[in-house]
Image (cartoon, coloured by chain):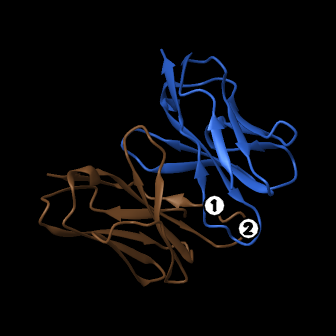
Amino acid sequence: AQSVTQLDSQVPVFEEAPVELRCNYSSSVSVYLFWYVQYPNQGLQLLLKYLSGSTLVKGINGFEAEFNKSQTSFHLRKPSVHISDTAEYFCAVSESGAGSYQLTFGKGTKLSVIP
Amino acid sequence: DTEVTQTPKHLVMGMTNKKSLKCEQHMGHRAMYWYKQKAKKPPELMFVYSYEKLSINESVPSRFSPECPNSSLLNLHLHALQPEDSALYLCASSSRQGANEQYFGPGTRLTVT
């Protein structure tokens, strides 16, 4: 079984400042890793994914994440945030291999960008 | 195109009503999912259909009845719901290949009165 821990439930940050949203996972098998964003009253949008290969993954809207196997982490970063980045961010993990259905989500981090 | 559509956007129903939620995708995905999301919580998996067959039912009460008429459509039939069933209901789909990443629809906001 796998689990995901998002270390911060809320992260306030000033506009144009950098941000890092932290995610740690636990699994006994190899995993795929994802970050999703949910804007108010909307569904989840896939920001980026890590399957294998390069540990630095670039996604949409200027976000990137770095996979660290030794620390079992997949932290999300953006060098300069905008007001429009205010949203809930979910880290998620699934078992690698033949099309696992199950996505295990973290509890989410609410990013609030302050003008 | 990575779009999953859901109708209706909002739904208010009484505890004795019967209603249905609809989900559609045209990405050729062969897995479709229903999730329930309460406020300030992550989505909780309810059902998974793979190749139009029910693969996973996460012990969901029988007042929720899923249906997959074809590979593009997914319905969730609702009957005799309780106020605690009020939530955002999300549909998702995935290709069943590679990382099998899931693409979500905008959701239906359900209120049970």
The secondary structure type at the circle numbered 2 is: loop
Compare residues A57 and A88 and report the one nearer the observer. A88
Q: Colour of chain A?
A: blue
Q: Amino acid at mark 1?
A: Glu
Picture coordinates of residue A58 (x, y %)? 74, 43
Picture coordinates of residue B52 (x, y %)? 49, 83
Q: Amino acid at mark 2?
A: Gly
Picture coordinates of residue B102 (x, y %)? 58, 61
Q: Colour of chain B?
A: brown
Q: Residue at x 49, y 45 (%)?
A: B42
Determine crowd level at label 2: few under 14, some 14-19, many 20+ residues with C-alpha closer than 10 A.
Answer: some
Q: Residue at x 57, y 42 (%)?
A: A90
Q: Which mark is residue A79?
A: none
Q: Which residue is mark 2?
A: B98
Quadrant in which residue A7 is drawn: top right
Q: Are marks 2 and 1 in contact (CB under 8 Å)?
A: yes
Q: Which residue is mark 1?
A: B101
Quadrant in which residue A31 is drawn: bottom right
Residue A109 seen from this side: yes
Picture coordinates of residue B60 (x, y %)? 39, 66
Determine crowd level at label 1: few under 14, some 14-19, many 20+ residues with C-alpha closer than 10 A.
Answer: many
Q: Residue at x 49, y 49 (%)?
A: A44
